[in-house]
Amino acid sequence: MMIPIFQITGDPSRYYQNDFIIEGEKYRSYLCSDAVREHLEKQGEDVKLVIFVPESFLTDITLQEFCDLLEERVTDFEPAVLPAIGTFRNWKFEGNVEGVITSIFLYILNQKPDKFYIDISTGFNLYPVSLLEAAKRYLTYRKLENILQEEYKVKAFKIFSPIIGEGSHVVEIQDLDVKAFFSLPNADVDTLVKRDKSSEKVSLRIGEINKEYNLVKSRFRSLYKELTMAFNAIRFNTPLAFFDLIEMSAEVDEIERGVSEFVKTLLEPVENTVKKRARLPVDGVNVANAFYSLALYRSIQKFAKNLGDPEIDEIYENFRKVYSKKNLGIGVNEYFLGRDVEDIKMTVSRALKNRKISEEEEKLYANLYSHQKCEVRIDENRSYGSSNIKRNFFAHSGFLREYTLIKFVGGKIYVQWLEDAKKEIKRWLESPEK
């Protein structure tokens, strides 16, 4: 497994050879990251050094010429160009910090390492902070990918050393970690660029890019709509949605590649003239939320693919395992689902005893319920506990008696929703709090 070390470069001419002390061992190098690479390779690790180069260094020389200068200090590295912000050597670079963070995030995401280091000991002003923030967003993304599975394979570390100058420096290597919460990311693929003060030329360019990636955006919207329902089905404890309404069959990897290309295009310069380079004001938080959505969808999709038939005990066991995961914060759902499953089992048991249902016969849950003295008409919207049918739906794990069909086959109880009720249930799951 290749382990990358990511670092932002400053002016190479200002770097001097130093003795870097790492875990008691001395390494002579110009860059802290190079010393860490040597230390890790000594331990048998396969390591590569990735150096981000702000484009402000490339105003009068090429990337290769800059790399040649840098190679006087460090060899065998992978260069990657970053957007610049501000004025440098009489050049004006227009953009925003989120554009820098997003560029780094996409680069790390493209490599998708399971273990990596970031060296924040070099780089001008905002760049080391941007590297740190991008790394945290990547870690959040990776955790969301497996949040239902609780399989967090990625490890990250941040590297500190004193300001680069002649002398001997002790290098600190610390764990880098984030908390990922089970919540629905607020992602809007139509507003990945802030338009507050956009010129007519910029607005035109945004429109052109949106048109070019219209299909990508449409596919993401469909995925996000299904993600919303799936997330709400878990959060609000309505497991039958995964059998009757939600397919979770989107080609998430393909959609993610499309969104990546879309964002990369948004990051390209919209103005590139002598002494000026301008980029769109990308909304990096919204971009991150789009990728968080893709990651969360991927986790729920893996869970959904392992579900079998809508048999009541199997539903309980599969969803109990999810609800019991402490990192999700929805443990109370296990109690309510268990209660409602037992209610269904008791109802069927009484119905079998009273011969209200026979083998392979399908009946409406409400008509099997012991205290019902007559058949319930579906269009009467009669309910139990409250006259608010939507409230009752969520209060009873989605097993609304007026909408749930029960079938007894081979000693097992199978459930499904009425076909005529699915449209209304879908609306509830899309907007449960409205």
Image (cartoon, helix red, strand yellow):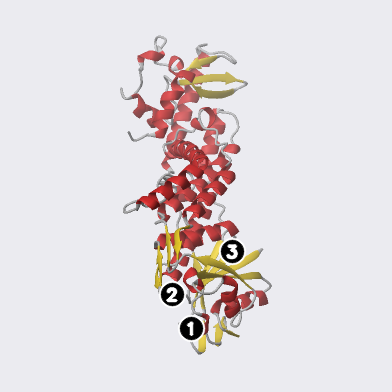
Q: In the visual, does 279 lie left or right of 71? A: left
> Disc 2 or 3, which lies upstream in sequence?
3
User: Circle 1 sits on which residue?
Assistant: 164
Q: Where is residue 196? Give x, y as percent.
A: 32, 52
Residue at the image point whose x is 41% and y is 69% from the top:
126
**Amino acid tagged 2:** Phe
**SS at circle 2:** loop
- Residue lying at the far right in this picture: please name it: 44
Residue at the image point whose x is 53% and y is 13% from the top:
357
Crowding at dot 1, Cα within 10 Å, few <14 / some 14-19 / many 20+, comes out as some
* Occupied quadrant, residue 317: top right
Residue 35 in sight here: no
Marking on residue 124: 2
- Residue lying at the far front in this picture: please name it: 274
Residue 431 in sight here: yes
Crowding at dot 2, Cα within 10 Å, few <14 / some 14-19 / many 20+, comes out as few
**Amino acid tagged 1:** Ile
